[in-house]
Amino acid sequence: MSGMRSPEITTWNPASWQARKAQQQPQYADPAALQSAVAQLSRLPPLVVSWEIEALRERLAAAQRGEAFLLQAGDCAESFADCESDRIAKQLKVILQCSLVMLHGLKRPIVRVGRIAGQYAKPRSADTETRDGVTLPSYRGDTINHPEFTAEARAADPVLLLRGHERAALTLNFIRALVDGGFADLHHPEYWELGFLRHSPARDAYERILRAIADSLDFFKSLTGSTVQETGRVDFYTSHEGLHLLYEQAHTRFIPRSQRWYNLSTHMPWIGMRTAQLDGAHVEYFRGISNPVAVKVGAAMDTGWLQGLVTTLNPNNQPGRLTLIHRFGAKEIERSLPRLIDAVRETGQNVLWVCDPMHGNTETTVGGYKTRRLENVQKELELAFTVHEANGSRLGGVHLEMTGEDVTECTGGARGLSDADLARAYRTQVDPRLNYEQALELALMIAEHSKKARSL
């Protein structure tokens, strides 16, 4: 997309975005009720704190240098109904499993960032949806409206902003309790095993990795008489698309200690491609917060647009500040990624490059199901490593939509799921997710790629 012009420099404040054109924002029938909900949000305790955000930025800076690797993963869109202890634990387990496999293969620390505790709003390709001659507003996520196709359900309800904050707080509180209570203890990774993994073709490879890690930890303990530091817990961070700007504004607080503004609803918000206009409201909002931020980028971005985003969002070239999550599709990545790498290199800026192999490989079956074929997801990820290496760059992470549930939303994998299998457990409200086995297979592929690269 060409014709993206640089924005006028403005004096930033959490509401300065309101002077810009804001894409993908819901329309509320009652402005007073919306103002009341936003005011209540702004007085509620934050979900995260600034020193956690700064710790994540330092870890992302390490990933930029090739000293760590980012795993950003979770649901396409969280729903309020999924705020249940069992589902949250399963989601955390599968992310931990994948990070363990990648840690073993990459021989680098894994920065774990969940698409969780706030991923309640989703962009849509159209403002309305029509069924049987009836046109209603599109479903935009549980923090905005409801998925049922009725006028009442599809009306944007400002009270849902408060319900979203509550669900995010409950989710994050449970995750913190699990992590702090030893759920993620690297000395006992067997505790993470999901019951249904025993039927997975990847089970043997996973168990070999568990044994290898356990043996290594035991060897270190016998040799030194002490345990490896920080293996009793892992750091876990949250992220979501910063789409609903009034919600994000309400969570933006000035921290006197550091003299900076932070979005305290999440550690790492990101901008989607639909809202990444240089002169748009989202870029204006994001440029002023001190969180590490990410932007989804792809083939539709021309050089000027991408370079403008890099220099606007990280004018001081701060390490760990800016992550670019590229999404092309397996057929497009070889042609388009080198151009983006060159464009960023021309700015002299350092960014963390991350591959999202999911969104560019979405297709619709004859039966009307949106799906992604695992072989295409794997191919794009493999090509991402190759293209970065060939262009003197470095792939520093992966961004996945996946779940700990036994769903059938993406085809392929060791069990050979086909289009005919999708109806069995197709539960997503928006985009298809990798199930637990497919996610683990992808993590094993990343680990194997690293082993092969080191052997060359």
Image (tube, grey):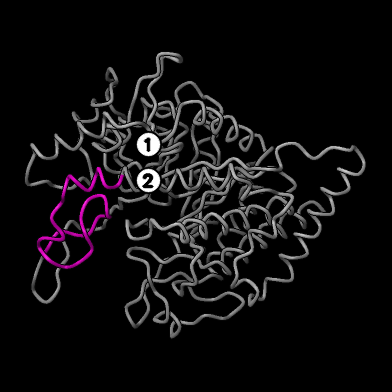
Which quadrant is home to the C terminus?
A: bottom right
The picture quadrant where one finds residue 423 is: bottom left
Which residue is the site of mark 1?
Answer: 265
Residue 283: x percent and y percent?
A: 33, 34
Q: Are marks 2 and 1 in contact (CB under 8 Å)?
A: yes
Give, as a three-letter code, the residue at label 1. Answer: Ser
Residue 182 position, x and y percent, is 63, 47
Is residue 271 found left or right of 142 in the rendered image? right
Q: Secondary structure at mark 2?
A: helix
Name the one closer to the observer, 268 or 172.
172
Query: Label 2 amino acid?
Result: Ala
Q: Residue at x 23, y 26 (%)?
A: 15
Between marks 2 and 1 in the image, the one whose residue lies nearer the viewer: 2
Which residue range is magenta in the image?
136-164
The residue where tag 2 is placed is: 168
Q: Is residue 151 magenta-colored?
A: yes
- Which residue is drawn at the image coordinates 37% and 67% (left, top)? 428
Q: Identify which residue, 238 or 430, lies in the foreground.
A: 238
